Each structure stands twice: as structure tokens, then as C-alpha cells.
Image: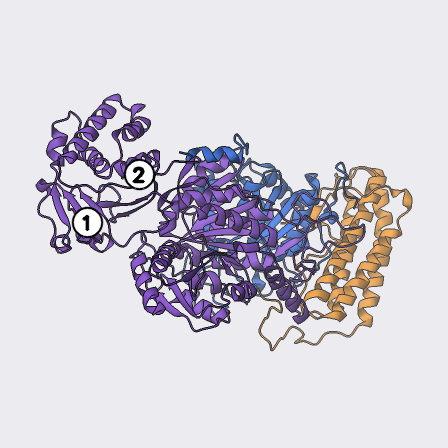
Amino acid sequence: MSRAPDFGAVKTSAELLSVARAMEERSAERYRELAEAFEASCNNPDTAEAFAELADIEERHAADFPVSVGPRPETVPWGEDDPEIADPDAVHYLMYPWHAFDLALRHEHETLALFSALAEKSPYPEVRAEAVRLVEREKGHIVTMQTRRDELPVPPDDWDDDDDDPNWEAGD
Amino acid sequence: MSSCDSTATYSAKDFKSEVKPVWCPGCGDYAVLSSITKAFADLGLKPHETSVVSGIGCSSRIPAYTNTYGIHSIHGRALAVGQGLKLARPDLTVLVAGGDGDGFSIGGNHFLHACRRNVDLTYIVMDNRVYGMTKGQPSPTTESDWDASAMAPPGGTGMTPFHPLAIALASGANFIARGFSGDPNGTAQIIAEAIRHPGFSFVAIMSPCITFREEQREWKNTMRSVNIEPTTDPAQAARRLMTDDGFNCGVLYRGNRSSYGKEKKATNAVSDLDREFTL
Amino acid sequence: MTAANMFLDAAAEAGYYALFGRSSGPQIRGGEAAALVRLGVDPVTSVDDTFDIMLAIDWQGVQRFAAELPLSANSLVICDPSAGDVPEVYVKTGAKIVHLHMKDLAKEIPGGRPNMIALGAIAELIGIPVGPLTEVLGKSLKKKRADAYEASVAGVKAGAAAAATLSASKRLAPAKAKDAKRWTVTGNYGAGLGAIRGGVRFCAAYPITPATEVLEYLSSALPKVGGVFVQAEDELASINMCLGASYGGEASITATAGPGLSLMTEGLGLAVASETPVVVVDVQRVGPSTGIATKCEQSDLNIAVYGLHGDAPHLVVAPNSVGDCIFTTQWGVYLAESLQTACLVMSDQALGQSRAIIDTPADVAFVGKRLQAEAPAEGEVFKRYANTASGISPMPVPGQDGCQYTSDGLEHTETGTPSSQSSDHTLQLDKRQRKLTGFDYGNHWATIEGEGDIAVITWGSCTGAAREAVERARADGVNAKLISLRLISPIRPQHMGDALKGVKKILVVEQSHLGQFTRYLRGEYDLPVKPEALSRPGPLPMRPGEIHARLLSMGK
């Protein structure tokens, strides 16, 4: 359901900051959800742990914003196309922690691209200025994710092979 | 959460329970759960005055993941249970949820009659065109040529898939919409609208099964929101639904039939009933 | 049938008790039909061995009824010679045959009908005065059409006058003075009334013979008391709608017969596992499959007791007279609500579709009441399936804040969370059984009458015939005790042991080819002696004579 982002949706620098922080929070929530899913239903504790760590990282990113940013907005203007947030189906039950951080890295890149575009295309000067600062912040996040990913073992080519047929542990 | 506070407002989180879903990571049903709880919160509902009713199947596990009054009943019978509850307790908000096998195969007859009866409740079908819980058999909405299943013959079943939305219209449903799990906010809005609309509201939510139908990951590129005014004219809705490619999301039909059931009002004492038997 | 109902009302007016059954062909309209009436100065709970009077307006399709209309040499056959010869099967009985020109008499009256001539004739023969008859005619006809009323009264009078000239009479003993108001009720309407008295306010059902009248009654009576009736699309929907309504806090009922009960068994299992009260009235008919839909048989016992998959203890009760359909259904609702489980009320066609004149039934205090839940303390989780001493866990009503839970057919923990652990399964199985076996059912578990060396154990509509047989045997010097089980499941070993103390012989009476009740008693109870069984299938009703004969041979 791709929609082009509406670059005029955010009108002030304060608004942009609160949206940017909400993006980090939403991203943390999604990673937390994935961590629980991997823990509860597919016996993949390493990846569950990786998603939990990602949730922690995103929470720290959200906490980096000054308290003065104000309450979390009801919605984020780019909705489900929020680049910071992982698609719920972008995962695989056999995926490795490396994949989790690779996924996160991709989203940090996408967020960077969004803020860069905003820095150019927003009709409001103060939004453009704030977006430039956010681009710098995202660059830092990219480094974090990439470093963390590269510390992890690269998955083998046959990482998604499963000799067993699908099963439902609690089938009813 | 404080009890006895009738003015308390509840967030989506308050509608989620502590029980962790057993769904596969990446399953579309996680997002549907979020959409449902968001819709409840947006409507200002209270968890103890809301009920989620289901049958059996992957998606039918959903009541336990909410903090509402839930019923996880038996395969195919969710709509019967839900209608009974709503008719006995018109004051409750009743949402019935399940999958395509539960709703259109074993529960198919109840689906037709629930549409026809038009009890004021919302029915959500998380459609992934496959039986997930029993390991990937074709369902009534599975494409006729899908054969990547141990139980499907080579070349597929050869049977035309059901068109649940058109069937709902023909059977008398009062509100018909399609949502997509990949668009939880849009879907939450549709669900909220469905709950608000009187009578039987049917919301088909395309929710990929990434375990048995890996190709459904593509749905995020093919599903689209339709920004058309929902029609109240069944003939126009029929045309719209029959020319639909299955990827249009939004409210497609909004009927104006009044919902089933009369106001419950006692006019007699139980002892008055004796009269008809007394000589 | 209209004339027969009027006859019954007139007999009741004159102070008699009665039992009225019917037999008809499969046609929807206009087929052959027989009204089977037994009158008495005391309450009538059984058919007799033979009929005293057979009045035949015509002989259409009589071969279908022959076995249901036994006559003896003492019987009287009244027939219209214009309808043809008396069938050989009745001539052979040696019954006295007299002619009454019903058709011709009717023709002499403008708008006259032969059935009114018959009505007047039969009233005259047994000694019911014309007064009560015309009163009944007035009640049912006067408002509708004055001319029809006049014609009917003229017909009744003509019939009575013609019968007076016949050299035949079958006068009833004079009726005893009525000390209180009496009721006229069918078992099926009675079941409906009992349900409402017990607190039922919701019924979802699918029509089926011979249970339809339960639904017919509830569909009009429930809205009057603030209840809801829904015609469901099938029996799967009816039972599950009832479960939804019951979860919502309303005592719920459905009624069906064997084929419908078969469809409902999965839903009943959910009621047991999720501990949701529900009552199902099964008006038994001849099975298996479609069987003989309009006739009685007691052959649904096995499915009622053993028909659910898994270990699923639940309640099975059975009314043992037309009037008892009121009490037993009410009691069934009370038990289901108290014990939070499924209760099957095993009525049968002979009880359900028979109409009886009875003494006004007592309005007993059994009104279903669930153990109410209270919200747990802050920070604690509500335990819907708490492992209490009685096995009964408090049950909230939706809307109650802080008690939200998911009712589940999956095995679960005390909070209701699905669990596949052995310890949870055992705990919940124990709990669901304990609440049934530990409950105090009082003395309603059985109807026990008389004393003697022989015990007649029976149930349902066989009870009336067994009672009459026991009375006849006593007159012959053979003393027997009647035990009619009202609570079929769970068993009451202690009570049964007490009831059978000193008993040397047991006769089980039931209407089942397989002897389902006999097998059940032998399998579940430690009986002091091996019982003899008088078990045979429907569609013919159990008659007192055959039980009486058996008792005499056992008493030798």
C-alpha cells in the first residue's frame, strides 16, 4: 500500500521532533512485538534476543529527544509507510540475529532518506532546518546498527532450510 | 486499571491481555489484533463491556489475546455463539473474529444466515486463503490452481474460490469492507466504522500466512486503498464487488437495513403464564 | 382433532382427569388421524391395554393404526354404515358393533358436520351431559362464527339423541368433586413453562418433530417475560447461540429430537468444558436416523449419557409424566445454572405430545442461580476456573469490571489460559466431575412408590404403565415397588442402594430394542440382583397389561 510521503504534513520544527520521537517509539514497540513472537512461538531465542536488543536501542533513541518535545502525536503522517518501522511480515521463523540487525539497518537507511528528502522538499524553512539535524542523528544510528550487525556471524546460505514439515505445537 | 470508574478511558494497550500469541513471527494476525484493539480504544469502549468471540483456527485464538470478555468456541460456530450473546445482551459490543476456513467452509451456513439475520455485530475474517493450523490445506478462498499443499491435487483444486464479499452482499449483510493487515491504521478505521454501523458488518481482512503462503508477502505491493464513497445501493455494490480484483481496501457497501431483534421488555409476570393452562 | 380437544375440555369441565394422545399419518393436511383418549376419576398417567369405545367416522387408512387401537370383546365400535364394512381386524376382536348414521344426521343440519354428531354421541354414551359440551363449543366457536356455533350445538344434540336410542352404553363412574382448579397441558408446553419458571430467558431452536411445540410455546411466551426466542438456521446454530446467550448471563434452552441432538453434541461438549450452563430438551422419537418421527421410543439414552467425546460429565434428567415435564424441565434449568454445565432433559413423544388434565402443579422454588463472581483484588488475576472445594467456580456476567476472561473449549488453567499440561487437565477433569457428584439433588432423583420384594425400575413415559401394572399386581397379591429415575446422570449409588434394600427381584421396563436403560443400570449401578428386562422398541406404547403379566410371573 505505497503512498508518497506528504512533505507538507509537518509544519513546525516542534511537530517534526515529536513525530521523529514517535517513530523511534513505534519502532521499539514493533521490535518488542517481534521479540515476543520469536520467543513465544518458534523456539528461536537468539533472534528473539536480537529483537529485544533492537527494541532497547530504539527506546534509547527515543529517550535522546529532549523532554520538551511534548506528548506523542496520535498518528505519524506517513502511517504504515513510516520508514523506521519494520514490516511485521518481513521476518522468517528461522532468521538469524544478523538478519534482525540487517533489517534494522535497512530501516535506518530509509529513515535517513526520508529526513534528507524532507530537508530539501519541505515548504517550511524551520522544518527543513530541523530535518538537517535529524539526518545527522540518523547517520549515527546507521553506524550503531551496522557495527552491531557486523559483529554477528553471517548466516549460511541454507539458513532457511527446514527438514521438518510445518507443525503447530498447540494445534486445535 | 481501576475498576468501578465509569468515566475511565482505555488505550489500545488496555485491550491487550498478558497472553502472548502463538502465531508465527510475521503472521498478519498480529497487526489485525493491533487494529482491533486500536479500534476499540478509538471508539471509547470499555474492555468489560466488549466481547470477542471466535471459533477454531490460527486467527480464532484472538480472544485470549484481548482483555475483553472472550469466547473461544468450536470450529465454525463463532457467528452462532456471537449472535446468541448479542441477542441476550444488546448492551455489549460484540465482535466475532476468525479465519476463512472457519467462517466460509465449516461455518458457511452460519455466515449466510448471520448476513440475512442482520444482528448488530461485527464479523472479521482474517483471510489468508489457507488452513494454517492444520498445516496448509486449501480453503474456500484458495485460488483454484494453488497446489503447494499435501492435500491439494497437482494443478490445484480446480474449484472457483468463494467471493465472501459478494456472498455477504447477496445474503443481506449491512456493511461490507475489506482491510489489509499491512495497513493496521487503515484497518483500525474500517473496524471502528464497522462497529459503529448498525446491523451485521462484515470486514474481510487480507492477512498473509507467511508460513504456508510465502507468496502472500507480495500483498503489500498489490493491496490498495480505494478512496471511493461507499455505496448504499446494493446493485452498485454488486457491480463493484464483482469487478473487484480482491485488492481494493476500504468500505465498499454501507446498507441501511435496521438490525434484527426487538427491545426486550417484560409485559407479564411468570405467574401470568399459568392462566393459559388453568381450566 | 378439534372435536377431540373439545371432548377433552368438556370431560375436564365435568370433573374427569384425562390423557389424550394422537396418531396421524404423514400427510401435512387432511390425512387420517386418530384421537386416543383415556378418562378417569383419578389422574391418568398411562394408556390402557385396550380401548372401551372406538368411534370411527370413516375407515380411511385404518390399517396404519390397527396395532395402536387394540380392542377386546368388551369394546364397543360405533361406525357409520356409509363408510363401508368394519375391517376384519376389529370384527375378529368380538367387539360389539353398532351403527350411527353420522353423515346423514349431519346433512339434516345446515352447516352440520359428522364430527359434531360423533362428539354428541360419545358424550351421551359415557354420560357427559350436553351442558359442558356446549359451553366448550361456545368458548372456541362463538366469537369466530355464530352460525358455526349454532350448527355445532345442533349437531352435538342430534348425535346425543341418536346415541340415546342405541342399545349400548359405557357410562363412566361419576366424577369426584374438584377440590381445586385443574390444568390442561401437553408435555411439550409444560416443558416450555417449566423452563421459564426455572429462569430461562433465551431460546434458539430449529423445528423438529416431535419437539416443535416446545418451541411454539417458548416463541410466544418468552417475549412476554422479557426473553428472546430465535429460530436458528440449524441445530448447530441453536446450541451455540444458546451458549453465547448463556455466557452473557441469560439462562438458555433449546429443544430437539434425536437427529438434532446428534448435531448438538459438539456444542454440548463445549458447554461442559467451558462450564457454560445450557439446557436441551430432547423429545425422543423412534430412531435411528429419521426413524419414525411421530412415534415414541426411549432410545436416545445412550447418546444423552455417552454421546459426548472426551470425558465429559454432565446432567441427564427425565420427566416421568406429562405434568412432570413442567417440574423436571424447571429442575433441569436450576441444576444446569447451579452446576454450570449442560443438562439434557429427556422427554419423549408420548409425554411431549400428549395432553393431560392434571391437578394444578405446585410452583416450586427452583429458580436457576449462578455462583456470582467478585472482581479480584488490584494486581490479581481473575480465576474463572478456580479449583474450589465444591468444584463450582464463581462465574461473572459480561459487563462486570475486572473479571474479563476467555471462555474456552481448549483445556485450560484456572484462569482460562489454554494449557496442554497433564496437571491442568487432571485438575479441571476432577473439578468438573466433583461438582456433579457432590451436589445435593434431594429426593427428586427418583419417584418411588410402594413397597415389595420386586422393584420395577423405569423412566420417562413408561412410568405411567409401570405404575398401573404395580397397582394391578398388588390387587393380585404381588407386591412391587416402583422406582422411576428422574436423575439419570450422574448416578446416585447411595440412594439407589437404600431404595433397593430388601428387594429380591428387579424388573427394568423401557422402550428400547437394545435395552439401553437396562444396560445403563447394570453398567453404572451395583444392583443387588441381576435384573430382568422388559425392553422393547417403539412405536407402540408400553401398556400396563404386559408389565402386569410379567410381575405376576415373577411373583410366583
- Label 1 belongs to which residue? C75
Secondary structure of residue under mark 1: loop
Q: Is residue C556 above or below residue B188?
A: below
Mark seen at residue C174: 2
Q: Is residue C255 left or right of residue B14?
A: left
* Cα distance in 3D space between marks 2 and 1: 20 Å
Q: Is residue B240 above or below residue C148?
A: below
Q: Residues within 10 Å of mark 1 (few under 14, many from 20)?
A: many
Q: Give x and y (percent) for residue C370.
A: 63, 48
Q: Which chain shows up in purple?
A: C
Q: Is residue C471 left or right of residue C109?
A: right
Q: Are marks 2 and 1 on the same chain?
A: yes
Towards the viewer: C185 or A125: C185
The type of residue carrying mark 1 is Ser
**Chain identity of mark 2:** C
> Could you say which quadrant of the image residue A32 lies in?
bottom right
Q: Is residue C350 left or right of residue C245?
A: left
> Could you say which quadrant of the image residue C291 lies in?
bottom left
Colour representing chain B: blue
Q: Which chain shows up in orange?
A: A
